[in-house]
Image (cartoon, coloured by chain):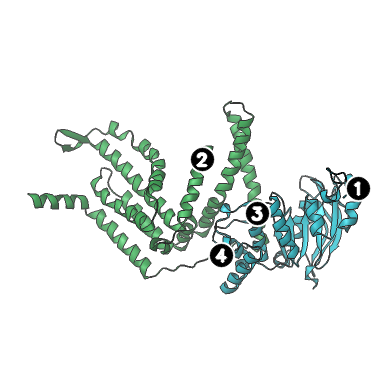
Chain colours: A cyan, B green
């Protein structure tokens, strides 16, 4: 299915105040891949993500999702195909109850009532939040909020999942839970994160952004072994690949 | 800020009460909202010296609290919280309006005192009814009901968003205030600093609004707000609304306290 392809060609973005956030970005992500976009603060990760869903339009260059170029006409279809989960779940959960929130997307797609009901049920079950359906969002814990935020996107059955800092602000247990959940998804997945251990666990491919450019693009292990490259981009090896601080052994 | 925090937490409790499952909770929100509106309009429409005719109106909140199984002390505390406003509004009436209207034995009661008591009673009644309404319906329910009886959708959605984000906003506000306090070493907040705090809060709210809008667009928002409507306005709702409304309107034109009084004195004389 070519639906799941994300292609970015010579993407450049200059903010109205003159800041060049993205210089010249090109990559192609194919069906079922799990890709992490990493980089220092201000490297352009968030700007790039906001392009994938058409919130920002390129100053130059092109984005293709599946068979369509991203234009005004294809925007509604692309927004259904690309499910975007924001960093702060409070931005994503704005309806009075969890149920209403998860139903928001399907209702906007104009689906009939029974279908909406089914999708909400499935999406909540998938993230293990079926029991939360009638709760108001402000009564949820951080981990629950995150999982419900993912459900709000899953209910639209997207082909591509884009997540900004998925493990941000979660306790270790909730983080593990979320990682196990994400591992199960068969979607094409694109993450940004500073949690490099999660990246190592979930992503087979890593793209490093540095000052608005793609500095490296390749298999995760290969990139994480290149210490010189990582240091140059204000990054470091995932902790699990570093030597043990207690016994001094090599990871 | 701690007190605002506390008050908000308490507000969440009011919202939780709305999850109850009594006959009153199950009624369609529209019936409850409309009955409360009729109640408030009738109570407010009395003349400014009216006191006795207002007494029977307490029946409405009392019955709703009983049937809705709401915790009485909690509701009373909520009402008490808003009473100072009424006290301030009515405070000067006894001073300016000294004309004696009622003579009880040798004690002359002035118009000022009557109107003062009337104002306080009215605010207790209206505020109480509104709190009870939220307690048995929930704020989202009230908004949706208002929309379904004809309030423009934009306002309903605004109210819903206000309600959803007031918690997030006060959270942010109190975090900023805490951060200021930690470095203020006991100094009071100066106007300039207050302005800067509020300005920051406004900007943050603005940015958050943009992010929420993005999240809405990402899920296909086109300006149409779909909400669940799983209750309908049936016979029980009609009965509820019409009987309360009739009761209020009768009370408006017939002073029940007086009638009872003359009945009792009639029997004994």
Labels 4 and 3 positioned on one and the same chain: no
Provide residue A200's location: percent of width, then percent of height: 82, 56
Closer to the observer: label 4 or label 2? 2
Q: Label 2 belongs to which residue?
A: B4
Q: Could you say which quadrant of the image residue B63 lies in?
A: bottom left
Q: Residues within 10 Å of mark 4 (few under 14, many from 20)?
A: some
Q: Is residue B211 visible?
A: yes
Q: Label 3 belongs to which residue?
A: A143
A20 sits left or right of B6 in the view: right
Q: Residues within 10 Å of mark 3 (few under 14, many from 20)?
A: many
Q: Label 1 belongs to which residue?
A: A227
Q: Is residue B116 above or below residue A3?
A: above
Labels 3 and 1 positioned on one and the same chain: yes
Q: Is residue A121 above or below residue A165?
A: below
Closer to the observer: label 1 or label 2? 1
* Mark 3: secondary structure: helix
The chain identifier of the residue carrying mark 4 reads B
Q: Label 4 belongs to which residue?
A: B226
Q: Measure the C-alpha gap from mark 2 to mark 3.
A: 26 Å
Q: Residue at x 67, y 65 (%)?
A: A154
Which label was assigned to residue A151?
Answer: none
The residue lying toward the viewer, choosing from B11 and A81, is: B11
The residue lying toward the viewer, choosing from A13 and A222, is: A222
Provide residue B87's location: percent of width, then percent of height: 36, 37
Q: Measure the C-alpha gap from mark 4 to mark 2.
A: 32 Å
Q: Measure the C-alpha gap from mark 4 to mark 3.
A: 27 Å
Q: Residue at x 21, y 50 (%)?
A: B257
């Amino acid at each position: 299915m070519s639906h799941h392809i994300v292609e970015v060609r010579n993407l450049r973005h200059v903010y109205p105040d003159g800041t060049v956030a993205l210089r010249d970005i090109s990559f192609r992500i194919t069906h079922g891949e799990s890709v992490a976009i990493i980089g220092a603060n201000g490297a352009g990760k968030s700007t790039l993500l906001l392009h994938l869903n058409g919130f920002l339009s390129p100053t130059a260059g092109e984005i293709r999702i599946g068979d369509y170029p991203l234009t005004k006409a294809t925007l509604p279809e692309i927004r259904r195909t690309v499910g975007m989960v924001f960093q702060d779940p409070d931005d994503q959960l704005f309806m009075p109850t969890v149920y209403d929130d998860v139903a928001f997307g399907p209702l906007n797609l104009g689906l009939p009532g029974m279908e909406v009901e089914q999708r909400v049920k499935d999406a909540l079950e998938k993230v293990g939040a079926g029991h939360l359906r009638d709760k108001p969002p402000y009564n949820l814990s951080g981990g629950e909020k995150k999982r419900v935020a993912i459900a709000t996107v899953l209910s639209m059955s997207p082909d591509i999942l884009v997540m900004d800092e998925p493990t941000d602000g979660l306790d270790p247990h909730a983080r593990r839970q979320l990682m196990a959940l994400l591992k199960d998804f068969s979607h094409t997945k694109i993450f940004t994160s500073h949690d490099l251990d999660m990246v190592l666990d979930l992503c087979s491919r890593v793209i490093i952004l540095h000052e608005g450019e793609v500095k490296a693009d390749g298999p995760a292990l290969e990139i994480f072994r290149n210490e010189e490259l990582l240091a140059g981009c204000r990054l470091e090896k995932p902790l699990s690949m570093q030597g043990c601080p207690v016994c001094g052994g090599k990871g | 800020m701690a007190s605002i925090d506390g008050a908000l937490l308490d507000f969440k409790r009011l919202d939780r009460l709305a999850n109850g499952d009594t006959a009153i909770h199950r009624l369609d929100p529209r019936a409850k909202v409309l009955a409360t509106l009729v109640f408030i309009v009738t109570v407010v429409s009395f003349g400014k010296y009216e006191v006795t005719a207002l007494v029977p109106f307490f029946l409405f909140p009392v019955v709703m609290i009983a049937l809705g199984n709401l915790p009485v002390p909690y509701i009373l505390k909520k009402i008490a919280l808003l009473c100072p406003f009424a006290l301030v509004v009515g405070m000067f009436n006894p001073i300016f309006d000294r004309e004696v209207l009622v003579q009880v034995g040798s004690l002359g009661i002035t118009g000022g005192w009557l109107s003062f008591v009337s104002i306080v009673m009215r605010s207790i009644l209206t505020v109480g009814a509104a709190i009870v309404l939220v307690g048995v319906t929930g704020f989202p329910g009230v908004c949706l009901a208002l929309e379904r009886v004809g309030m423009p959708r934009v306002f309903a959605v605004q109210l819903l968003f206000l309600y959803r984000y007031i918690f997030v906003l006060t959270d942010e506000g109190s975090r900023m205030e805490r951060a200021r306090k930690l470095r203020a070493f006991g100094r009071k907040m100066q106007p300039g600093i207050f302005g800067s705090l509020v300005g920051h809060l406004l900007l943050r709210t603005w940015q958050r609004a943009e992010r929420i809008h993005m999240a809405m667009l990402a899920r296909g928002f086109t300006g149409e707000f779909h909400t669940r409507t799983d209750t309908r306005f049936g016979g029980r709702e009609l009965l509820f609304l019409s009987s309360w409304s009739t009761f209020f309107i009768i009370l408006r034109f017939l002073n029940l306290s007086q009638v009872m009084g003359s009945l009792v004195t009639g029997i004994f004389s």
